[in-house]
Amino acid sequence: MTVDPALASGSVGEQFARAVAANAGADVRIELPVALPAVFPLAAHRPRYTVRHLVRSATVAGEPVSYVAEPPAAGPDTAGARYADTPEAAFVPRFDQAGLTAATATVPLPGGLLDDPVLLARHVDYRVVVRLCTVENEVLLRGSADGAVTGLLRLPALRRRTTDRPLDEQLTAAAADVEEMGGSCDGVVAHPRLYWQLVHSGLLGRLADAGVRVSRTRMIEPGRALLGDFRAAVTLLETGTSELALRRGAAPGCGDLVEATVRIGLAVHLPQHFLLLETAGGATAGGGAVETLGGGRA
């Protein structure tokens, strides 16, 4: 069922709790006219950016979605002082297509919660939705199992820099390297450990003054930082809707489950506008090896 398209009568959790109460004993599925990761309540009161906060977005009606891409051209990755000597002077635009994938967070419910609509609503708003935010971060960074989203950390044209110095000391040099491709470094994805190093050093505030947002997530290793012109390089594709579902007896031990789902995709216009900065030793620095969806290492 679709309930209250304007979301005028309460939060997503409240609408879900009402649907559960109206369908006692049955499974429930509701469609909501929002992307759930965009309506996590606490995001309105604290500046913790997810990956979606770094990129522009577009609402699409179907798939595949056509878009224009400018893949990197052979040649230097630094610019001269004339346009003809810049890397982008050799870029050749082409049409490309992107698909969508379902990002889903599944959360078991404690016994008795379905009998308390107020507590159920708050649990969905504050605990279920935030887990979907984490799943969405993982898909956008590491890709989806169905291959519809490659993931920003796995882009074939991703540029890389390795340093034997602390990442927070090297971020500004890496940001300048991003701009050699003709873009503007407007975002960084970092592990919380690196984020708080930036807070301690004062660099986080200086990055903010320069218009650079830092998204912190555990879906990237402590020994890595992804920098890029996020708003120019990619577009987050979404349907503008999400689903919440109750599956009774589906949890191990016959408990109940809530599933939160959003369909998303990525149109990658300029993969060369991203740069992965990592400590010497690569993905093993501070966070273990990076396992790709295919079971290999990247």
Image (cartoon, rainbow, N blue to C red):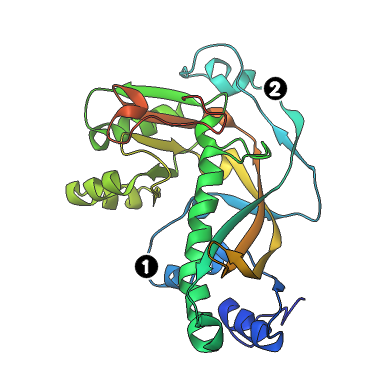
* Percent x, y of residue 214: 38, 49
For disc 1, the marked residue is: 46
Are discs 2 and 1 less than 8 Å apart at CB? no
* Percent x, y of residue 297: 46, 24
Between 40 and 271, the one nearer to me in the picture:
40
* Kind of residue at disc 1: Arg
The answer to whether residue 8 of the structure is visible from this angle is: no
Q: Residue at x 23, y 22 (%)?
A: 164
Between 186 and 19, the one nearer to me in the picture:
19
The answer to whether residue 229 of the structure is visible from this angle is: yes
Q: Is residue 279 above or below residue 266?
A: above
Q: Residue at x 73, y 35 (%)?
A: 68
* Percent x, y of residue 85: 53, 15
* Kind of residue at disc 2: Val
In this rendering, position of residue 134 left or right of residue 106: left
Which numbered marker is on residue 1? none
For disc 2, the marked residue is: 92
| Quadrant of residue 282 within the rendered picture | top left
* Percent x, y of residue 111: 49, 78
